[in-house]
């Protein structure tokens, strides 16, 4: 994997110098592999850097086949690789959604919160509509940092929307929005490690979540969500490659298979997340590792892939809805952006690259 990462970085730098943020934006592999690989390339004299960015040395240029540079491809600029373009009333909803989210509660490190770009939230709603997963559907959200419940409510298509979230501030905010807009979003303060409320089990057509990316977190969020689905229900969730290795992806795929679910879509890079929210900055690890770089000018490099799956008939529940589960919020081996890890991160990667 690391050799592939180094090759990827060399090819990204072959056309021109790039900032670390531009490299991250186009890097689709574990973040830890990116950092170790970039450091190795610097130490081996294949890549050099200055305050403007990283570039290939003469030695590095010899590692890239010049013939391969004649063949060019890029992600579709119109849909940004999402496969869906929203039109019609979705454009009006985006404008109103942005206005509502200006008053949202700020992220807190207590729950490792962050939220995706508003445009990407509407893109998810548009994809759901494309699959007929909105109109007349009962939808449950396992966590709602992104305020997907509000975007769904603006369409006036679902018949019921329920949010389960640990953050009481979100419930207070949704209550205010309900009052102002006449929405009927239901909020239940809920910790995913605890048993599910009995009145949500097996009641919904669709569930959506942006789960924690530890193995225990992924299992808890996905199993809880599936427990809320009716027969032939549908699920959506996001998963990164940056902090969820392919071993975790494989574990998730096996989990879904065991629960009688089939994956219909995996859209890479569907959702982008700002990493500096003012009160919480998840990009500080770059500086703690020792890279001398300029502040991010606004490149949203942290992206997650969108999974969609369908239950074939009745779901086979691997975690009983009424049992407690153990959930680890942080994976020290694969998570790099969690601020609790910053004190040890420079030492960790200095040792790996020595």
Image (cartoon, helix red, strand yellow):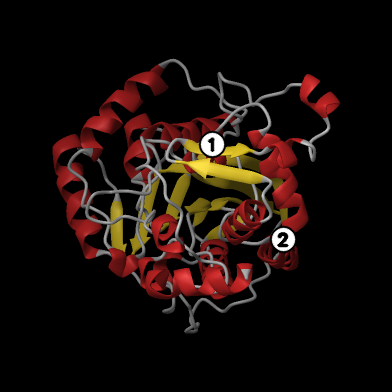
Q: Residues within 10 Å of mark 2 (few under 14, many from 20)?
A: some
Of the pair 45 and 250, the residue shown nearer to us: 45
Relative to 86, residue 255 above or below: below
The image quadrant of residue 352 is bottom right
* 254 to 23, vertically: above or below: below
User: Could you tell which of marks 2 and 1 lies nearer the N-terminus?
Assistant: 1
Q: Which of the 4 image quarters holds residue 34?
A: bottom right
Residue at the disc numbered 2: 253
Q: Residue at x 70, y 51 (%)?
A: 5
Q: Position of residue 321 (x, y in %)?
A: 51, 76
Residue located at (66% from left, 65% from top): 248
**Looking at the figure, which quarter contains the C terminus?**
bottom right
How dense is the environment of label 1, judged by Cα within 10 Å: few (below 14), some, or many (20 and up)? some
Secondary structure, mark 1, is helix
The residue that mark 1 highlights is: 128
Residue nearer the viewer, 32 or 185: 32
Residue positioned 34% across, 26% down in the render: 93
């Amino acid at each position: 994997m690391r050799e592939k990462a180094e090759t990827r970085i060399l090819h990204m730098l072959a056309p021109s110098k790039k900032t670390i943020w531009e490299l991250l934006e186009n890097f689709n592999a574990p973040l830890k592999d990116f950092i170790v690989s970039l450091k190795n390339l610097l130490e081996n004299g294949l890549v050099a850097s200055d305050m403007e960015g990283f570039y290939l040395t003469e030695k590095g240029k010899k590692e890239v086949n010049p013939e391969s540079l004649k063949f060019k491809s890029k992600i579709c600029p119109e849909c940004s690789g999402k496969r869906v373009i929203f039109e019609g009333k979705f454009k009006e909803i985006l404008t109103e959604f942005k206005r509502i989210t200006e008053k949202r509660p700020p992220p807190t490190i207590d729950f490792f919160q962050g939220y995706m770009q508003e445009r990407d939230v509407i893109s998810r709603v548009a994809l759901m509509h494309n699959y007929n997963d909105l109109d007349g559907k009962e939808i449950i959200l396992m966590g709602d940092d992104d305020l997907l419940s509000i975007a769904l409510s603006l369409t006036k298509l679902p018949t019921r929307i329920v949010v389960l979230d640990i953050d009481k501030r979100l419930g207070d905010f949704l209550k205010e929005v309900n009052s102002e807009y006449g929405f009927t979003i239901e909020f239940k303060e809920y910790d995913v490690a605890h048993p599910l409320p009995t009145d949500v089990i097996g009641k919904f057509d669709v569930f959506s979540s942006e789960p924690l990316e530890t193995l225990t977190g992924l299992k808890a969020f996905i199993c809880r969500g599936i427990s809320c689905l009716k027969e032939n229900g549908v699920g959506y969730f996001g998963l990164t490659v940056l902090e969820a290795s392919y071993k975790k992806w494989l574990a998730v795929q096996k989990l879904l298979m065991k629960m009688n679910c089939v994956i219909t879509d995996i859209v890479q890079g569907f959702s982008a997340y700002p990493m500096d929210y003012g009160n919480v900055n998840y990009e500080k690890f770059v500086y703690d590792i020792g890279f001398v770089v300029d502040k991010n000018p606004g490149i949203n490099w942290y992206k997650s892939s969108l999974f969609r799956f369908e239950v074939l008939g009745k779901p086979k529940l691997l975690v009983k809805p009424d049992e407690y589960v153990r959930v680890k919020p942080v994976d020290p081996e694969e998570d790099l952006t969690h601020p609790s890890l910053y004190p040890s991160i420079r030492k960790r990667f200095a040792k790996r690259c020595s």
